[in-house]
Image (cartoon, grey):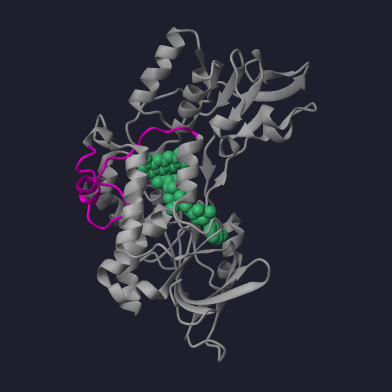
């Protein structure tokens, strides 16, 4: 374990051990190597990248959606270099890294930057500002609370915990009947290999994003027939957001935009809900031609009733359908005001919040306290790709600049 400062007071605490956390730490170490032993990472799993690996395994995702230059190392071509003898693991088009290749590479990044033992098991339940206090050696600091009752004081904190909560439609809570738990699930609870899907099962999948596509392909491969339902049309898009959002093409105007409201709207519009990649949509159309998948577009559920060992689904249009399982893949939402972790910071250091996004400074720092945010919460500065690997790099450059300046 890195020494930190003392066991209960550390210099840099990072909340979360996913790709964003790894990216920001490599960027900091690239500029200030000596900080390595002053950084501590907290995650309930106690290990790196657990959530990422869980999701890719759960949905049996063969490769990333983003090209090979996007990864947690500061050097854009590091993944290509690592893959010297594994070029067949890049997928067309745009050299999308295979899941295993990417995970092996992240393992190499962790080893090369000496971060194997940096993750401490712990779920942060509270972030509380502490002003100048004789008990700490810091002018201002943040106290992190863990269950049961453990506390750690950090001179600065980087939040890399994702922070989105699942979008769950109202009809889910109003489901009628005494249904078995595996008959109605949110995507975040699904592990394809463990669902027990069998030949002839009828699975209704709600949502138009890539996750719904992966789930449909996984269910069909186990012999199920799938009904895909969305309140909009299914449409194809190679990436989550246009590549113009990775550089000055779109970001120049975005950064020049003085209204946070306009920026927030641009972030949401650029992501435009969920989309399928052309490869996945092509596969689903093929399955449709084989009568294994049907598409139900512009369709919304009014109610679901479990009766006679099956769901009866009533749609707003008046259509009625029957199925054995319903999987809800309706994405997630971000709202800093509704995230319990930030309640105390918001109370002590109120900042403007626009459409759920906090207004941070250019280095992604919370005004008045040593808290930096990355991921979706950095959307007003980083733009629509803030949640993605590319956004992690952009956020890391800003946070590193802020930390070094503050040091
Ligand atoms: C299925 C899927 C595939 C994706 N594919 C791509 C892709 O190919 N390319 C791309 O650019 N983006 C992709 N994304 C989007 C994005 O890059 C990922 O969601 C990525 O995992 C985000 O990284 P992260 O570090 O912010 O979050 P996560 O990987 O979710 O890691 C956050 C970690 O923080 C921990 N945490 C949260 N709260 C706390 C707390 N209070 N205390 C301690 N720890 C906490 C969590 O347990 C978790 O381990 C994908 C997303 C999904 C869901």
In percent of width and height, residue 146 lies at 62, 67
Q: Which residues are magenta?
A: 59-86
Residue drawn at point x = 35 percent, y = 51 percent: 106
**Percent of width and height locating residue 193:** 55, 30
Q: Residue at x 61, y 70 (%)?
A: 145
Relative to 182, 270 lies left or right: left
Number of dots carrying numbers: 0
Q: Is residue 72 magenta?
A: yes
Q: Is residue 216 magenta?
A: no
Residue lying at the far top in this picture: please name it: 290
Residue shown at 56%/67% (left/top)?
346
Residue shown at the point (37%, 39%) measured from the top left:
99
Q: State the residue in front, 380 or 400.
A: 400
Q: Is residue 320 left or right of residue 47?
A: right
Residue 394 appears in view: yes
Q: Compared to 271, does 133 lie above or below?
A: below
Q: Position of residue 263 (x, y in %)?
A: 38, 51
Which image quadrant for residue 85?
top left
Q: On the picture, is 59 further left or further right than 337?
A: left
Q: Say which quadrant the C terminus sits in.
A: bottom left
Asked whether the viewer can see residue 297, the reply is no
Choose between 4 and 70: the one closer to the eye: 4
Q: Position of residue 98 (x, y in %)?
A: 33, 37
The overriding secondary structure of the stretch rendered in magenta is loop
Judge whether 158 appears above or below 243 on screen: below
């Amino acid at each position: 374990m890195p020494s930190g400062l003392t066991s209960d007071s550390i210099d840099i605490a990072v909340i979360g051990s996913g790709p964003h956390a790894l990216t920001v730490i490599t960027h900091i170490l690239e500029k200030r190597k000596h900080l390595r032993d002053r950084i501590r990472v907290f995650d309930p799993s106690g290990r790196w990248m657990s959530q990422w690996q869980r999701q890719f395994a759960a949905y049996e995702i063969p490769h990333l959606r983003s090209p090979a230059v996007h990864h947690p190392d500061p050097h854009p071509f590091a993944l290509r270099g690592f893959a010297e003898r594994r070029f067949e693991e890049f997928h067309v088009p745009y050299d999308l890294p295979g899941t295993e290749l990417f995970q092996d590479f992240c393992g190499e990044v962790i080893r090369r930057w000496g971060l194997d033992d940096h993750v401490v098991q712990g779920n942060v339940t509270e972030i509380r500002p502490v002003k100048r206090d004789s008990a700490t050696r810091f002018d201002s600091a943040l106290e992190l609370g863990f269950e049961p009752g453990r506390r750690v004081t950090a001179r600065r904190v980087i939040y890399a915990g994702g922070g989105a909560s699942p979008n769950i439609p109202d009809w889910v809570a109003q489901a009628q009947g005494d249904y078995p738990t595996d008959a109605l699930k949110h995507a975040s609870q699904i592990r394809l290999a463990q669902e027990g899907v069998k030949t002839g099962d009828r699975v209704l999948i709600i949502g138009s994003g890539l996750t719904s596509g992966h789930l449909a392909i996984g269910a069909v491969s186990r012999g199920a027939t799938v009904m895909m339902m969305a309140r909009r049309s299914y449409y194809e898009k190679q990436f989550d957001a246009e590549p113009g959002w990775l550089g000055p093409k779109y970001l120049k105007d975005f950064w020049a935009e003085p209204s946070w409201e306009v920026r927030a709207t641009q972030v949401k519009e650029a992501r435009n809900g969920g989309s399928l990649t052309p490869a996945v949509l092509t596969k689903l159309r093929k399955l449709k031609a084989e009568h294994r998948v049907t598409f139900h577009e512009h369709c919304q559920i009014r109610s679901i009733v479990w009766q006679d060992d099956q769901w009866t689904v009533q749609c707003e249009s008046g259509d009625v359908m029957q199925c054995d399982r319903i999987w809800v893949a309706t994405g997630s939402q971000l709202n800093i005001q509704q995230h319990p972790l930030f309640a105390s910071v918001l109370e002590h250091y109120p900042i403007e919040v626009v459409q759920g996004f906090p207004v941070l400074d250019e280095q992604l720092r919370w005004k008045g306290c040593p808290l930096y945010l990355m991921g979706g919460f950095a959307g007003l500065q980083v733009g629509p790709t803030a949640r993605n690997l590319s956004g992690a790099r952009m956020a890391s450059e800003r946070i590193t600049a802020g930390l070094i300046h503050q040091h």
